[in-house]
Amino acid sequence: MNQPESNHPPETETRPWWRRIPLTLQIVIALVLAVILGIALGAGNPNPSNAALINNLAIPAELVLKALRALATPLILVAVLHTFMTTNIPGTAGRRLAVLLLTNTTVAIIIGLLVANILRPGTWGDLAKPQKTITGQSLDPWGLVKDAVPEAILKPLVDNNVIQLIVIALCFGIVLRGLKSEQIAQGKNSYQPVEDAIAVLFEAVIRILNWVIALVPFAVFGIVAKTVAERGFAPFQSLAAFIIAVLVALVLQAAYYLSRVKIGSWVNPVKFLAGGTDAFLTAFSTSSSTVAMPITFEVLQTKIGLRESSASLGALVGANFNNDGTALYEAMSALYISQVIGQHLNLGQQLIVVLTSIFASVGAAGIPNAGLVTMTLVFTSVNLPTEYIALLVTVDWFLDRCRTAINVMGDMTVSALLDGKKPHL
């Protein structure tokens, strides 16, 4: 949908000085100030008289997480509907695109779970003591299928049941898209008002989300200051192990992409990496695959040499559905926190994490800080305490950039595979 032009040129619009500071820099400043305050409050040996103040430091993080949980389900719902209504997907190529995207996302999640199970970063250091027991759940495929059908249309929104939510969103998205295509084939489109309404709703929820994201530095400041004051720096050893584990998994995912490019396309993997440098750096620096999208589309054609149709399907269409790096991160986060609190996610629960991560990544590519939003849904699906997400926020600003670069590499890989094994002349 075309956005109306502003009556005021961008250069005349003034923003408060704090809004002109990049969010990443705000978080870094918050981390430094939080460490200073935590040391001042005792750094592991707090004065009992400061107990109330230390406990109150966690309030901003609790409010941010509560807002994210409230926004997660409606945001994913309208994001999926918006993607289906606005994305132009051709028939045969679209089916192949869907298979490639699903395969890549599944492999990413499996890699994440394998690395988390082998390295077990949650056992490195002393992040927290067990506080909550996770109810055991056996592997029951038929039970998963039955649970995917909600008892009422609005119930998944209340229960934060992401699988039921995505089933509803996909059903409505596919039907609305089919009806729209029939209307267009008949030379009319009476569903344009519906598409416009979904677009406006999506934009409205995104703006509210941006308000919440603007408060993340305060959440980081509070939770880090509280952690340092109460327990010193020991908990951050575990977070460092988590960062290493995620980076290892992302490197393995990149290796998988390069092997797919080598086997399934005519593109040389070295040329693929060199040609995509601009897109990778843009994704890392901006933490947005949407911002990197036009650059990705350009380098695929000019520096790698793909056909325009292949480049557009992977970089423009696929980017609306692809979130491999984020899905990998969601799965690893769930397993990491389960290790931190001393609980074990069995095979059935890990399968639920896989399915939830796949479904939660659908249409989430255009959502800013999608990892924080969808993580609440993944945690809820296996009854993990979402309050631990507050600690992950302290490292998410860096890992978000890394996984965004992997998301873009995934888009480029899909384009290369769609281009086939013969270069065009």
Image (cartoon, rainbow, N blue to C red):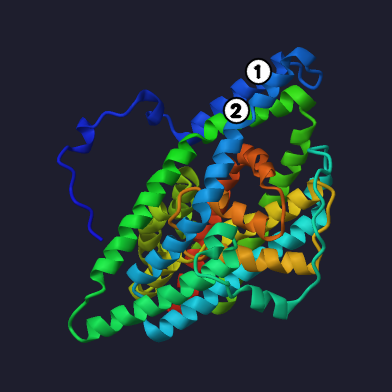
Disc 2 target residue:
221
Picture quadrant where residue 174 is located: bottom left
Between 399 and 210, the one lying in front of the other is 210
- From the image, which quarter does the C terminus lie in? bottom left
Instruction: Name the secondary structure under disc 1.
Output: helix
Q: Residue at x 47, y 73 (%)?
A: 170
Q: Which mark is residue 37?
A: 1
- Res. 52 visible in picture: yes
- From the image, which quarter does the N terminus lie in? bottom left
Between 286 and 50, the one lying in front of the other is 50
x and y percentages locating residue 112 in the rendered image: 70, 60
Q: Earlier in the sequence, mark 2 or mark 1?
A: 1
Farthest residue to the front: give it.
152
Q: Residue at x 28, y 85 (%)?
A: 182
Residues at discs 2 and 1 in contact (Cβ within 8 Å): yes
- Res. 47 visible in picture: no
Instruction: Name the secondary structure under disc 2.
Output: helix
**Amino acid carrying mark 2 in the image:** Phe
Left or right: where does residue 325 sit relative to residue 18? right
**Amino acid carrying mark 1 in the image:** Leu
x and y percentages locating residue 93 in the rendered image: 42, 82
Picture quadrant where residue 397 is located: top right
Residue 243 versus residue 116 in the image, above or below: above
Farthest residue to the left: give it.
7
Q: Residue at x 42, y 61 (%)?
A: 78
